[in-house]
Amino acid sequence: MRTDLIAQKVGFDISKIDEPLRWNSDWEKALRLLSTTPPTELFDLFGGDYFRDSSTSFHNAGDLIQSLWDDVYEHQTSLLSLYHELDKGGRLKTLWVLLLDRERQKHIQAGLYEACRTALWKHDARALCPEITLKKFSKGSGKAFLAFIDEYRKGVQSSAPDVYFLPSELWASVLEREEPITELTADVSTFLTLLRNDFIATFALSTGKSVLDDVSYRSPGTSPNFAVSRSKPLLRCENCEKSPDMIEGSPKFMMCSICKSKLDFVIHYCSQSCQKEDWRRHKKHCGKKKVSKDLRGTIHDPFWMEPHMPDFLRDLPRDAHGEISIIDMGFMAPAASHPFTPALQRQVSLWTADKNIDYFIFDEADRPVCLVIPLKTDKLAFRKMRQAALSSVPSERVLGVKFIGDYLLKRTPYSPWLTRGNILNQLGWEYGENMKQVILEFEKVLETRRFPPGLPYLEWFNCHMAVMWPRFRE
Ligand SMILES: [Zn+2]
Ligand SMILES: [Zn+2]
């Protein structure tokens, strides 16, 4: 299916997507033009001759409509849980209002970009949504966007278990036709309405993800006020490892003043004697390198907010500045007791050759389809699971394979020569034939728990964990 036909018809060059600002203002110009076009012409432009002339006639409309319906429903369901997470205690409003204008615009732009990239009809779908514009949502210091999201969430909630269709006057007039309705025009109408709502749901979801990403990244644009509701990291003595409440009289802790002034790095001590005792160990790094014991619960523990986080998730690779480096994650050499299969060997050597790619899936003709996870938190979780899948410990391996298997089945980029079967077979070759069953069973478990269909478990997990994730370096 071509996804730039309408864009072309309105004289729009989709390759401009790499220049986001220009790309967006071009689109908004095109959308203004479209809204002055008579509705009947719009119907033909969007659907009429598109489907009549299309070489792949609209014969499988029923299936297409059903699967698109499922997609939209899935996006709307994940959107509810994502915004629920973002909006705990009504904080979304506070967060959004406190953002700088350009930060708000960045998030909306990210949402539009992602929707043009991942909605089924890609760029063309944007033409179906003239009311979804950066200009409109930026109004009133971004209040217009908040109002839209509020209404949208209410709409989705009250429509469940049905898909929610965002009402639009323009759109209603496009679909209102004087000629008699035929099966084709009815199918085209339904299809277009779904495509339109697929775009809107993807936009809302992606904008929310972008905000969540920043919140978890605690980017400079996010107000520090946002973190106030979190509990603070623990103070623990670098030497005896105790926290104030474990010591009689809860003494006031001191810190290494050299590390603080030279590196702006905080290491705590409960007493002078503990600092002296630790000096033999600490002097090698003092004032030169940010090295601490990363004691659980302290500011140096990337999961200080989550005391129950398993150790294998805490153990993250650091770069020379002591920062977590996602790109260096997810590798592991084979253990003698557990050699890699040839397929897995190939996979691992590809990861090593291009560390930006999270996974390579091969289509029918053995062409690689590259998975790159944009969201840092999802990427981190995926990489950790990728690493677990290489483990020589069977229980870790099973855990890793089922998580990445579930993710790959749901999030591998679309390719016409790629099926679910291909992906499962590949995972079977890489991790062992029996793992296919493990993945399928995991899928069934998620289903019986009424897990949102199509949402990878990892992403769901991250929606709930994201506020706790540490700050990452790309
Ligand atoms: Zn101490
Ligand atoms: Zn020091």
Image (cartoon, rainbow, N blue to C red):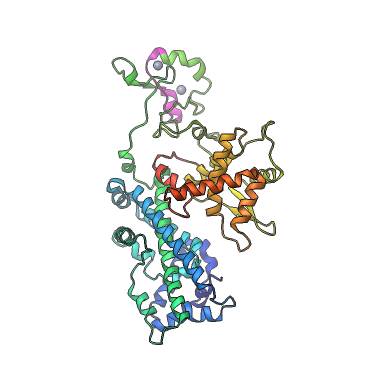
Q: Residue at x 28, y 15 (%)?
A: 249
* Residue at the spot 60% in from the left edge and 47% down from the top edge: 436
Q: Is residue 152 within the magenta segment?
A: no
Q: Nearer the viewer, residue 177 or 271?
A: 177
Q: Which residues are magenta?
A: 256-273
- Position of 103 relative to 265 (above/below): below
Rendering coords of residue 65 (x, y %): 47, 69
Q: Classify the position of ligand 1 by quadrant: top left, top right, bottom left or bottom right.
A: top left
* Residue 233, image quadrant: top left
Residue 228 as seen in the image, left or right of residue 264: left
Q: Is residue 9 above or below residue 244?
A: below
Look at the image and say whether residue 271 sits in the magenta stretch: yes
Percent position of residue 98, x then y:
31, 49
Residue 474, above or below 294: below
Closer to the camera in the image, 347 or 62: 62
Direction right: furthest residue = 342
Compared with 324, 183 (above or below) is: below
